Image (spheres, grey):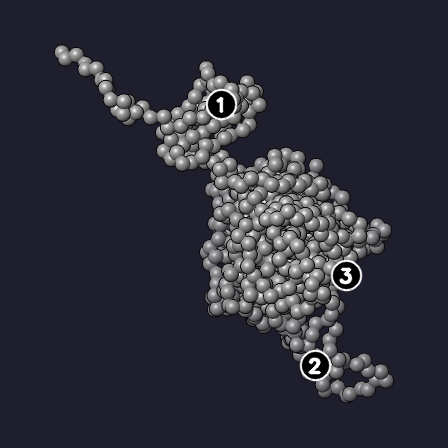
Amino acid sequence: MEEPQEISSTNDSCVGDIVIEKYLVESKEAASHVQLACSVQHCAFPLDGNQLCIWNTEDPSHQRLILRGHQQPITAVAFGNTANPLLICSASQDCVIMWKLDECREKVLEASPLLSLFIDEDSRQLVTGSADGQLWIFSLGESHHYRCVTHVDLKKKTESFSTRRVESQLCSLPEESQLPSTDGLERGGEIEVELPVLSLAPCALSLVPSSERGFVSSENASCLWIGSSAGLFILNLANFELEAVLRYKDFRNLSIQVAGSCAVMGKTGNHMAFCLLTSLFGSQVAVLEIRLACLVRSLPRPNVGKDLSVLPRSGVLPTSPLYFALVEEKSTKPASQKQSAVRSVVKDQPLVFHSRVRSSGYTSAPHVTMFLPKTNIKNNGKRSSKCKNNYKCKEYPSESPLPTRLSKQLAVASDPTAVCCLQFSDDGRRLACGLANHLSLVFDADLSGKPAVFSGHDGAVSTVCWSHDGRWLLSTSQDGTLRVWSARRTELALCLGEGMFPRPVQSAQFYYIDAFILSSSGPEFQLLKYHVDTCNDDLRRYKQKSRCKAVFSLRMTDAVEMTSFSAVNDFYSYIVLTAGRNRTLEVFDLNVGRSAALIAGAHSRPVHQICQNKGSSFMSQQSQVYNLFATTAVGDGMRLWDLRTLRCERRFEGHPSRGYPCRIAFSPCGRYVACGAEDRHVYVYEMGSSTFSHRLAGHTDTVTAVAFNPSAPQLATATLDGKLQLFLAE
């Protein structure tokens, strides 16, 4: 057996090749008798006692990652067993912390230094600003755990604001030396590479009189001054959009064009704001006085949308498609054989002239009595004797708490099948749902008893809609057909297929208090006049005499595919809201029969649902609230819009919906909006807050659809695995 040879070196240079010191760091406290950790790519050790230091062994160019969270000195460190995600655990006398290294490196190494911080007491939000022009808004609400509400890129917001200003074609500005010129904006505007957030301060934009403020900001929205090296910005904390931009270089009378430091005092009683600036390249210090009212008056005031309203302001025009259809209904009403026999007898009788003959009214336009929703907010509680025993006259409890208690859960089928849509009837007594197994079911509102089954579709049911009187149930399916069912007999009354539409039907609903059916197919929607045969003869009713014909149709601008639409059926309204595949929203006025407004870039992705605040027959709301509607898109949250301004008034962020098009719904009182989410929860937002107020658990899969009962404080939810949940008020 050979003895092992001893390895030695007589050359000093060879010694350096054997052992190389790759990294050295000095710690303020000794790290002896501490469990250290090494993995294939990383080394972990305590630094300065209570800090955890991570070093990448494969790429030493990466700076060390410092993780802070311990109050006591770290005594042990260990890596997890999986490479993705890479976990590391650190322990001290006070706590044990589990870190996800990839997320920590993304947030810590790639983040720029924080330069400013602001807490908004009204919205209970924390706003931080960094050197690279990024703002992060966090929720300070109870049980929110400092959840990140949204992230704002100041540079992108400035570019978007400049684009909107160019499109508005601002024509005149008073006092050229005091207000910014638009020459740079008309050429496209040069946007600074970085806009560091130097300071944050509250802005009293809501105190400016509404006559001067125009459409800018709502009265209750919180706004924020953002001070940067290039200028001052006003950010709306409700919709996270810029309301005003004031750039130093646009004002020729300012000595400082690039600021190094900034401080803003925004809350003053005389609509003034003061800004303290120091120069980045010089020694100047300046104090600016900003007249907020003048700044707001210099902003564009588009006129589009000011005449739009969900509630009709005038009668039906003689040229409206609604007018001709209603007149046709009266003029073509079929007469029975008995009536014709009577006429044949009458025409042979002597003609008798009466002293008084009532005018036929042929020379005057027919009058249509417009039914309006209940807007009488002040109610003395007195009712007529007719309503004492009438279910329709029951009032929705205005001060009732939100339904948050899970009362009942049931499976709609023996095998898991997705529930695609939900809708309560207008009287609140029945709940309809469309399933992926081609069926539609109708339950009692309390989910008791055996459901009524409507079968006939050859694809997943994508839409269910009740008629206003509750007699009919409309459904559309992925098979491209539209069907109207008798809710009482659970049988088909009308079926519209390929021969009726140029493309398969995507969605449909009753419209104009059941006078029409609105349907969408491809880039257009059709106004359909229908007649459902109500024959009670068991032998004759199987020979379908129901009929339907298209009386009017409109296409979206650029003929893009329509992804969603919405209109009110509870009362007469001329407005139809549509969404296109190109992320636009378009408003149509059927009284004039054309497009009334177009909103480009409503979301970062196509809108999959438009939900209007339609109110309820059991609840009174202010008339202007009916002009609010919400939109939602996969991965882009919800946005609240006002038809009068055509602006996004508020954004609702925080509910995960990255892959499935979860649906939304307004409460009958108009104070809440609920949405499904992929984390098996329902998120409920108050209209005055961008963060959720309630998070409802108890679901077993992705929540696909939600619906509020119009007559009682109840919330129904549906999941992807085919279960219905009913929530009641505490």
Residue 216: give its label: none
Pick the front one: 261 or 40: 261
Image point (45%, 34%), residue name = 63
Rendering quarter of residue 211: bottom right
- How far is the residue under mark 3 from the one under mark 2? 64 Å
Give me the C-alpha separation between circle 1 and circle 2.
109 Å
Q: Secondary structure at mark 1?
A: loop
Residue 218: image x %, image y %?
71, 54
Relative to 597, say whether 353 is above or below.
below
Q: Amino acid at mark 2?
A: Arg
* Residue that badge 2 annotates: 343
Name the residue type under label 1: Ser
Q: Is residue 106 visible?
A: yes
Q: CA distance from mark 3 to mark 1?
A: 63 Å
Residue wearing tag 1: 27
Question: Label 3 sits on what residue type?
Answer: Ser
Q: Which residue is label 3 attached to?
A: 211
Residue 124, image x and y in percent? Answer: 68, 40
Q: Which of the two marks, 3 or 1, is nearer to us in this view? A: 1
- Give the residue drawn at x 69%, y 50%: 286
